[in-house]
């Protein structure tokens, strides 16, 4: 009777063989990965004992915690911060001598190009300006570049405008 029962189960067990084989292969692969990881850990421990790591920092490496700057001032009433490493993207101004900077600004406020007021250029970040460049004419781009040169002279803005003018005139 046992032989008949086993014979009846053959179609069902044949269907489970591929899954059983796949499961055993997956188990074997995971076991090999664990063994390799154990060997790597033992190798790292051996190398650390033979060649202890140095806690030296290269001269050229600087980290934020190494800098002894005053902490950044928190933003007040939604005001954007324009200091720190993200100032480039938030429209931050480089620190300049206020007496030297007042003269070009005063001179240029009398003849502000129309495109500057239309775009509200003074409040645009670099990314916002980049998004609007494709819709501007070459004359507008040149006016913006001249205005930037006469007022804030921010290098990223000057480069962006100059590159766009070059691409637009090359077409």
Image: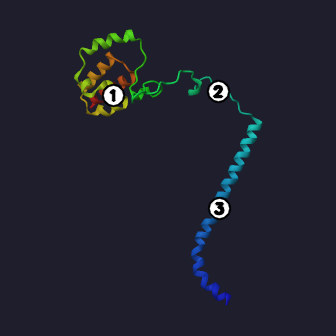
Quadrant in which the C terminus is drawn: top left
Q: Is residue 32 above or below residue 85?
A: below
Label 1 residue SS: loop
Q: Label for residue 27?
A: 3
Separation of residues labelled 1 and 2 (CA atoms): 39 Å
* Percent of width and height locating residue 123: 33, 26
Q: Which residue is mark 1?
A: 124
Label 2 residue SS: loop
Q: Label for residue 57?
A: 2
Separation of residues labelled 3 and 1 (CA atoms): 58 Å
The residue lying furthest to the front in this view is 77
**First-in-chain label (1 vs 2):** 2
Q: Examine the rendering and report whether any part of residue 95 can be seen.
A: yes
Q: Badge 2: how crowded within 10 Å, few (<14), some, or many (20+)?
A: few
**First-in-chain label (3 vs 1):** 3
Q: Quadrant of residue 146?
A: top left
Q: Residue at x 74, y 45 (%)?
A: 42
**First-in-chain label (3 vs 2):** 3
Quadrant in which the N terminus is drawn: bottom right
Q: Residue at x 27, y 25 (%)?
A: 141
* Percent of width and height locating residue 122: 32, 24
Q: Badge 3: how crowded within 10 Å, few (<14), some, or many (20+)?
A: few
């Amino acid at each position: 009777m046992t032989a008949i029962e086993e014979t009846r189960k053959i179609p069902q067990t044949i269907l489970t063989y591929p899954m059983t084989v796949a499961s055993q292969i997956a188990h074997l692969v995971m076991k090999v990965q664990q063994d390799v990881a154990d060997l790597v850990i033992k190798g790292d421990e051996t190398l650390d004992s033979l060649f202890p790591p140095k806690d030296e920092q290269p001269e050229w490496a600087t980290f934020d915690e190494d800098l002894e700057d005053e902490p950044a001032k928190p933003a007040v009433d939604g005001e954007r911060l324009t200091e720190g490493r993200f100032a480039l993207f938030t429209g931050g101004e480089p620190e300049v001598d206020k007496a030297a900077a007042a003269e070009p600004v005063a001179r240029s406020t009398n003849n502000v190009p129309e495109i500057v007021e239309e775009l509200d250029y003074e409040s645009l970040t670099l990314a916002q300006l980049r998004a609007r460049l494709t819709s501007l004419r070459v004359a507008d781009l040149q006016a913006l570049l001249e205005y930037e040169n006469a007022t804030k002279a921010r290098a990223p803005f000057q480069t962006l405008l100059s590159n766009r003018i070059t691409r637009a005139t090359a077409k």
